[in-house]
Image (spheres, coloured by chain):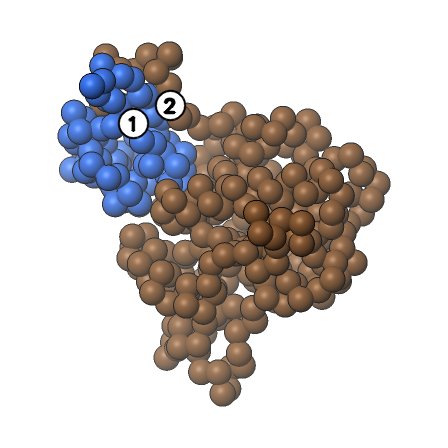
Chain colours: A brown, B blue
Amino acid sequence: MKEATGIKEIIKPENLAYQRTEVLVDNTLSYCPGCGHGTTHRILAELIEELGLQSTTIGVSPVGCSVLLYHYLDVDIQQAAHGRAPAVATAIKRLLPDSFVFTYQGDGDLAAIGTSETIHACNRGENILIIFVNNGIYGMTGGQMAPTTIPGMKSSTSPFGRDVKTMGNPLKMTDIVATLDGTYYVTRQSVHTPANVRRAKKAMRKAIEYQKLNRGTCFVEIVSNCPSGWKMTPVESNKWMEANMFPYYPLGDLKVPSEEKGK
Amino acid sequence: MAKIRGSIVVDVEKCKGCEVCMVSCPTGTIAMAKEVNSKGYFNAYPANPELCIGCASCAIVCPDGVITVYKTKI
């Protein structure tokens, strides 16, 4: 392995402060430079390791950029048909109630073709964790406009910006599922700065713990960037996301369990 | 007072040069290399290693998980 190292005297096993978790296997991620998917994969893998869930975790991967989830996480993964991950996860959780079941979906999968599965799984209150990575675009197929594309945002099929008069309004899936009785914990996070990564990890840890207690659907949205689809550098795309995506998709908890309120 | 010193190790061949670690580093330790790795990316490297405090911000935010952090008190 070719390495670029800092001060060599400090690099000893007893001084180790942070290293990549072993649940995230050694394959190079297929994502573009700076993509939030990699960070989201890593915090999920770290939580699986920290909570000792590696042997009991079953993930459901979507269609989209993150379709290759099974290449990167060293846990059981089932690939679902486009948008049907919550339906597949429902069956897995009902048949194997002791396992930790999550779906990992992008906005093209969860908010477009899979809208009905998502809403109904959340409404039934299936005891699964849904991780929703929202970058406001169809990243894998070439940056076309998605239901989550914000007004005025340019994409390859809305080159002059999304005009809500002719193209409709963006779909705020997280706000919709927060209104359903079946969901237990609904939150929106991001992973573009160290502080946000820590908050997102904390939210995801809560969601995993609620699943252990059979509380109902937990829904974690990660507002992410798509440097290739947005035609920006990763750092520019993170700034653009802060300036434009966050006012439309404000970060924070949308639905907090009643016993957690006031804590 | 004990001083905290850190050191990072970057897996050069897996780095995609997205620069997210560089802007996240509170001390300006990290910079991008002038030469590319085998995939053609300008990888991150500790340009000012003596400034590193081992806070692991770079490793936490790295999308590809290529940074390992070591930390000690001296």
The percent coordinates of residue A246 (x first, y second) are 41, 63
Q: Secondary structure at mark 2?
A: strand
The percent coordinates of residue A193 (x first, y second) are 36, 47
Question: What residue do we see at 80% from left, 38% from top?
Answer: A97
Q: Which corner quadrant of the image does residue B19 belong to?
A: top left
Disc 2 to disc 1, C-alpha distance:
7 Å
Question: What residue do we see at 33% from left, 12% from top?
Answer: A12
Residue placed furthest toward the right = A95
**What is the three-letter code of the residue carrying label 2?**
Ala
Q: Which mark is residue B14?
A: none
Q: Which corner quadrant of the image does residue A205 belong to?
A: top right
Q: Numbered disc 1: what chain? A: B
Q: Secondary structure at mark 1?
A: loop
**What is the three-letter code of the residue carrying label 1?**
Gly
Quadrant containing the N terminus of chain A is top left
Horizontal placement of B39 versus A122: left or right?
A: left
Q: Numbered disc 2: what chain? A: A
Q: Which corner quadrant of the image does residue A19 belong to?
A: top left
Horizontal placement of A192 versus A118: left or right?
A: left
Q: Visible in this render: residue A10?
A: yes
The percent coordinates of residue B61 (x first, y second) are 37, 41
Q: Is residue A205 above or below residue A131?
A: above
Question: What residue do we see at 37% from left, 79% from top?
Answer: A160
Residue placed furthest toward the bottom = A165
Closer-to-camera residue (A240/A263): A263
Tag 2 near tag 1, CB within 8 Å: yes
Query: Mark 1 = which residue?
Result: B54
Q: Visible in this render: residue A105?
A: no
Horizontal placement of B72 versus A152: left or right?
A: left
Query: Mark 2 = which residue?
Result: A17
